[in-house]
Each structure stands twice: as structure tokens, then as C-alpha cells.
Amino acid sequence: MENTKMSLTVKVLLGMALGIIVGLFINLGGLNAPGSFVNENIVNGLFHVVGTMFINALKMLVVPLVFFSLICGVCGIGDIKMLGRVGGKSFALYMMTTAIAIATALLIATSFGIGKGMDQTTDIEFVGKESPPLTQVLIDIIPSNPINAMANGDMLPLIFFSILLGISMLLVGRKAKGLVEGAEVANEIMMKMVTIVMAVAPYAVFALIAKAIATLGLALLVSLAGYVAVLVGSLLLHLFVTLMIVLKVFSGLSPALFLKKIRNAQVFAFSTASSNATIPVTMRTVTERMGVNNSVASFTVPFGATINMDGTAIMQGVATVFIANVYGVDLGITGYLTVIIMSVLASIGTAGVPGVGLIMLSMVFTQVGLPIEGIGLILGVDRLMDMIRTAVNVSGDAVVSSIVAKSEGKMDLAIYNDPDAGVVGTHGLHIDEAVEKELADTIQKTHDHT
Ligand code: ASP
């Protein structure tokens, strides 16, 4: 049992390493030339199909999982007043960590003076997209049509509707008991689906990484070495130092155990470059591996995937300093403060999907008066940077979930402190023959009765 338990994480990491090697081989060997056999059939054929199917499978789980787990979370919280506290605390912590992230990034980037004296010509064009104004973000929290919000996978309105539904079920009281029990079963079923999807992850992660590296290569990283080094350095610093200090100070939990347990979610975030698509894995990780009660996690995880983007904020800071230096613009202290405020606000209104950081960046640039075309300079490396920063974003969501749960007494420390708790293995994916028969009989009996 122990062996099969261990093997998934190891296999996923192996898939990732193999993906990097194969991707590099294809890229450096020039096998990815447009029209070539490998490019058409392997990179954009097999790898693309397997990778996208996997991302679809993860996205498929997000809406029903968030919906049912939030209903269970609200009904199972035991004290409805706690809901307000969980909301307030997580919001404050999410904003705080994002602000620290960007401030550190600005500090590091300015002290390295990245981009000074660099050529500003680029043939890659960037067309800035609008990110929604804050008033619209507020309005959109309330869905005019919940089904629509679900169909579009809009997190904040989905959270709002599910919480309101849970509260209304509590208000209806005993009569709603059947539905509460049903939601609990549905939640457990959704979690099982997460385990099934995770079981195929090693192959999918391989395909996703191999495709990304084969297409992008690492040559671009070299030409932008200064930007990339400072950005990656700041991201790692935030992940391993800042977030771990925040975790230790606010909750007293062991950072070493945290880092061990979060690894799977990080790999998923890295391969998909989407906090939203990673929600099922993050949710599973914080509840089953770290012992965060579902009443906290069902809210903090989807909420964090939407409003908390530490990694993205770091990229905003480093990119702003980089482009400002390339164009010889002096932002001054007001400019930097504007960047901090804008990045924090922009992270609230934008969902955790691939490439959203660039949209936020164009918003920041407009505010501080930097040329939007400058973004073209960093566009080539952005996908790889997106993968890394998404892993940091997701880690931040899990840190805040753990802190809030611990402070509310909603954390099972026995689970947190057990290094092997909730490890994904095939042991949870075994259909009991007796149960199978029993359920078939139930169906048969119900059928015969009607
Ligand atoms: N891809 C990131 C996320 O999903 C957002 C970004 O930085 O573009 O969290």
C-alpha cells in the first residue's frame, strides 16, 4: 500500500522531468519546425490532445465541486457567524500577501536595475485587453442567472449563489435535511472524481510540459536572462521564505510539512498555468493532505484562485521595473505605490486562468504611463513564467486556507502532521464487488416496483 501511495507524486514529478527532456530534445533538435512530422503529429497532435483533454477534465470538476462543497461547507460550519470571520480573515490575508509580494518584487527588481540599457525594439506586438473596472467586479459578484455563472465557470458569483443556497437550507431547517445529506454525498463523489483524474496526471503532465518546452524552447530565456532571473528569484523567495514565515507566524504550522504536501498542487498549477483549473487538486490537497475542514476550504480555495495572485503580482512588479528601465522612464515613489495598489486591485477582478497576468499588466502600465507595446518584450517568455507564478499563486491559496482554518479551530492537526495523510493512490479507486452488487440490486428493485 505504502508503495502505491508514494508512486503517484513520484510518477508526476518523473512525468514532468521527462517532459522537460523530451521537449528540449524536440526544440533543440529543430524537430518542431512548422509542418514537420513531429510538430504536426506529436507536439500539436498527441501532446496537445492528451494535455488539453486533461485540462478539460480538471475544469469539468471545478463548478460541481465548488458548488457541492460550499453547500456542505456552509451547512457543516456549525456556527454561521464563523462564515463572516472566515471571509474577512481570508480576504485580509490574501490582500496582505499580495501586497508584500509586489513590494518585495519592486524592491528586488529596482536594486538589480534590470533592463537598463537594453534595446527597446521588439517585433512582437502586444495588444492590451481591458480588465474589468472595480465597480463591475462588485456588480458581477451577484449572478443575474446562476446557471449562466456556472456555465461560464465564474467563481465569485458561483461562490455567492452556493453560500446563499446553503444559508437558505439552514433557514429551512429539518425539512432540508435530505438535501444536505444529498449534497454531502455529491461532494464525496466529486472528490472521488478528482482522485480518478489525478491518477492519470503523470502522462498528462508529461504531455503538457513536453509541448510547452518543445514550442517555447529555452533560448528566449537566455536573451531575457536578467528579467527571468530576477523574476524567478523573487517568486522562489516569496514561496520558500515569505509565505513560509507568514504560515509559521500566523498558524505555528510546520513549513516543511506544508512544502511537502503542496507539491502535487504545485505541479498541477505549473502544468496547467491556471489556478482555476487547479482548484480540484488544491481543494483535495488542503482538505485531505493538510486537514483543513471543508467548511473553510470550500470557501477559501475558490475564493483564493480568483482574488489571490501573489506570483502574478510579483511578475507585475518585476515587469514594470524592467520595462521602465528599458524605456528610461523614472516612475518615482508615487509610480511604485500606484503599481502596488493597481496590482492588488487588478488581482481581485481577474480570474486565475492562463495569461491573465498580462492583462493585469496592461492595466498597470496604463495607470503609470508606461508604453503598452513594451509588454511585447517579455511576451515570448511569459508562458513559462506563467507556469511558475501559477504554482506560487496556488501555494498562497493553500497557506491562507491553513492559517484561517487553524485560527478557527477547523484544522485536523493529526492529518497535517502525518506526512502520508491523504496521499493519492489507487487504493481509493477500488470498486467493492459486494457494494457493486448491492447497488445493482437496489436499482433492479426500484425498477421492478415502478
Ligand atoms: N495563470 C495565473 C493563474 O491562473 C494568472 C497569471 O498570472 O496569468 O493563477
Image (spheres, rainbow, N blue to C red):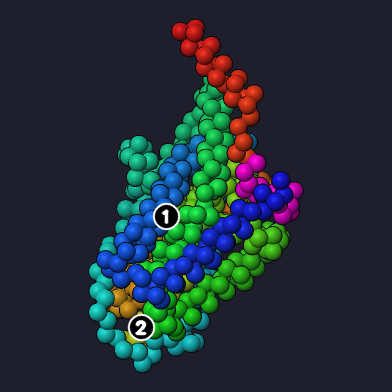
In the foreground, 36 or 136: 36
Expressed as whole percent of the image width and height from the top left, the position of residue 372 reads: 28, 75
Judge left or right: residue 182 versus residue 335: right
The answer to whether any part of residue 345 appears in the image is no
Question: Whole-percent x and y of residue 241?
Answer: 62, 71
- Label 1: which residue? 51
Residue 77 percent across, percent down from the top left: 61, 38
Q: How crowded is mark 2: few (under 14 residues within 10 Å), some or many (20 or more)?
A: many
Q: Point out the stretch of residues depicted in magenta.
A: 413-427
Amino acid beneath label 1: Gly
Q: Residue 313: image x %, image y %?
A: 45, 68
Circle 1 packing at 10 Å, graded few (<14), some (14-19), many (20+), is: many
Front-most of 347 and 381?
Answer: 381
- What is the spatial separation of the Cα atoms under label 2 and label 1, in whole angstroms? 36 Å
Residue located at (41% from left, 76% from top): 28
Q: Is residue 272 visible?
A: yes
Q: In which quarter of the image is residue 192?
A: top right
Q: Name the residue under label 2.
A: 324
Residue closer to the observer: 431 or 99:
431
